[in-house]
Amino acid sequence: MHKFDLKNGHVTYYRKFVKTDAYVRAMTEKRVVITEFGTAAYPDPCKNIFSRFFTYFKGIEVTDNCLVNVYPVGEDFYACTETNYITKVDPDTLETLKRVDLCDYLSVNGVTAHPHIESDGTVYNIGNCFGKNMSLAYNIVKIPPTPKDKSDPIAKSKVLVQLPSSERFKPSYVHSFGMTENYFVFVETPVKINLLKFLTAWSIWGTNYMDCFESNETMGTWFHLATKDPAEYIEHKFRTSAFNLFHHINSYEDDGFIVVDLCTWKGHEFVYNYLYLANLRENWEEVKKAAMRAPQPEVRRYDLPMDVYKEEQGKNLISLPYTTATAVMRSDGTIWLEPEVLFSGPRQAFEFPQINYSKFSGKNYSYAYGLGLNHFIPDRICKLNVKTKDTWVWQEPDSYPSEPIFVQTPGSVEEDDGVLLSIVVNPGADQRPGYLLILNARDLTEIARAEVEVIIPVTFHGMYKP
């Protein structure tokens, strides 16, 4: 974990490893002990082949390596990954406090690292689970705000609603989900987890998570909706062409429609297949060739009509004046969605999106901020006006920024009145190879930077804590 502490005109940089079981055991035994997303556990050299076989056969040991994000639950803060484990940390000292297994409280196999958090502290998340008749499903879960008695809100968490899976034993990979004021939005992509591989090949042969992914080349992409209160699944069958999805930008309701903005990658092939270190360590020309073969990125807007009548087959059901997205009822009762493209450039992705979350999450908004990926390499910070499609860019040679976090100016009214915070890696610098960059969110001009004299690895996600 990394922390830049800004106080009285001074900036102090802290960092500490999260002392998860995966970390402690790896450091103690000097090998990867628990299988990670793309790295299989390394066999214990002290065991013979028979003992190794029976060790693997005992079952899957799920990692608690919380390297993806950090978020508040009640008055506490948790580092997280995409499994059932989250790790409580001290935001002041970065000390690791305790590991929490969400399976002790909820019927989920794991949850995303991108929960939605309401102003009162209520946390919502989604994860796959075993539903009726041992078939797979997806549960949306709720962790309430801190109770009056100051007890742990995780102990009072519950499943709100269950969403069906398109395939009985192959759940889709879920990285994030959408939420408006009254609805949950779940996008089920054709990137699937083969549970048979997960439960057999891994247990015996020691493969990793990535070995268990496969693509369904015929399903396309499904959109699921559920109401928040009361929490109920909506049976509308929204369908569209195949794409990969990691990050929702924002979703909101407008005049009987739900508008959903997404960072997509076209096609059914899993984008992560191109992100192995061996690929990224190739020379630049080889990296560019691989990116040419990979699914291409696009920021898209989908509009989902809430009032659907089967007799209106073949007619565009979208009447919002500001979008070209369409939704058409088909004879089989499905509603086919076509998007409006908000941003597209050859091998240029707008990813790791952020908005003015506290004021505009789940509401009609104008601005998104993101990391610009050039052939998968993060080399710029971008701002996108989702209404006009205008863009702004911050970029410097040999500089690799991280997700830009928006912080609103206290008391401000305008949506983009604030600053962006990003950790920038500059590996070619002799003395100060990393810094916290502070940009004006209106035009991406630099306000300040706080340089450090140590190398900072590229980071994923984070948060601003006032």
Image (cartoon, rainbow, N blue to C red):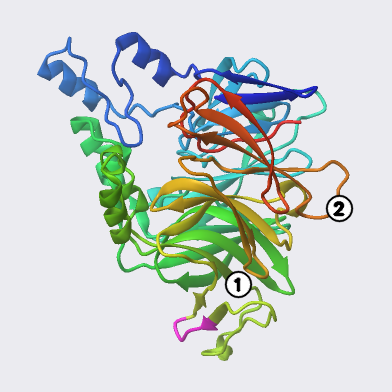
Asked which secondary structure carries label 2, the reply is: loop
Q: Is residue 381 magenta?
A: no
Residues 197 and 7: in front is 7
Residues 381 and 445: in front is 445
Residue matched to label 1: 303
Residue matched to label 2: 413
The crowd level at tag 2 (other Cα within 10 Å; few <14, some 14-19, many 20+) is few
Image quadrant assignment for residue 197? top left
Image coordinates for residue 365, horizontal then vertical, percent: 72, 61
Asked which secondary structure carries label 1, the reply is: strand
Q: Quadrant of the N terminus?
A: top right
Image coordinates for residue 418, horizontal then vertical, percent: 76, 46
What amino acid does circle 1 point to?
Asp
Above or below 169: residue 6 = above
Left-right relation of 318 to 126: right
Residue under the point 30% across and 38% down: 277
What amino acid does circle 2 point to?
Val
Asked whether disc 2 touches disc 1, contact meaning CB atoms under 8 Å apart, the reply is no
Image quadrant assignment for residue 464? top right
Residue farthest to the front, as pictured: 430
Left-right relation of 95 to 367: left
Q: Residues in magenta?
A: 328-332
Image coordinates for residue 189, horizontal then vertical, percent: 42, 59
